[in-house]
Image (cartoon, rainbow, N blue to C red):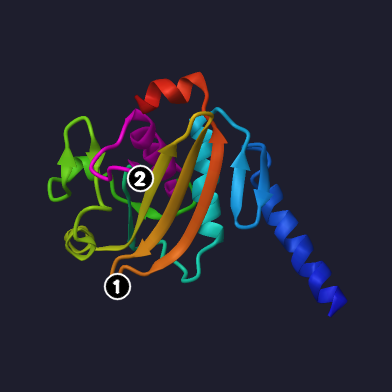
Amino acid sequence: MRKRVFFVGSLILLLLAGCAPYVSYTTIGTSVDLKESNLVRVGYVISDCLINNLRTPLNPDEVVLVACFVDVNNVQRSSSFGRMLAEHMVSRFSQNGYTVIEVKLRDSLYVKEREGEFLLSRKLRDISSAHNAQAVVVGTYLLAPNDVYLSARIVQASNARIISSCDFRMPLTDDFKTMLW
């Protein structure tokens, strides 16, 4: 039993160390405190964590959609921050071998000019079936006086079941302030 606990603990540390080249962070339970101001790295860490936390494996040959992150207080509203974070996550999912459709090139997904692609407030099954997607990546953010809180999920398109989730806190830098407003 002791060997098994040591092995599992070592495996977890090894998995977390895989994120080390990208970002500095502290794990608190199942959430992560990011000590990072590079939005590209943040998007990569969120993507990697979602992939590592999958309860149901994704088929790399089937489509995954990534929606822009939205304001948790108004899911009809995003920002440059939420749109760019999604862009970096699209890149990371693609780098990891997943089939990701560039939704801005498709006209069946609800896209609001200067706001982004919204999946949290739409009928998940309709949107995912229009794109023949197996899953969608959705996320919210909350702006606090000194921090930004992020919650990300992979939702199975067929039944809206959450198959992966990650939560993050990161410092509110001047760059992030500019992108959030």
- Look at mark 1 in the image and give the residue it sits on: 159
- Look at mark 2 in the image and give the residue it sits on: 72
Can you give x and y, in whole percent of width and height, for residue 42 in the image?
52, 38
Identity of the residue drawn at 34% across and 29% down: 80
The stretch in magenta equals 70-94
Question: In which quadrant of the rendered image does the C terminus lie?
Answer: top left
Name the residue at the bottom extreme: 1
2 vs 1, front mark: 2
Q: Are marks 2 and 1 in contact (CB under 8 Å)?
A: no
Can you give x and y, in whole percent of width and height, for residue 56 in the image?
46, 71
Q: Amino acid at mark 1?
A: Asn
- Judge whether residue 147 is colored magenta: no
Residue 21 to residue 127: above or below? above
Number of the label disc, if any, that sits on residue 15: none
* Of the pair 8 and 174, the residue shown nearer to us: 174
SS for callout 2: loop
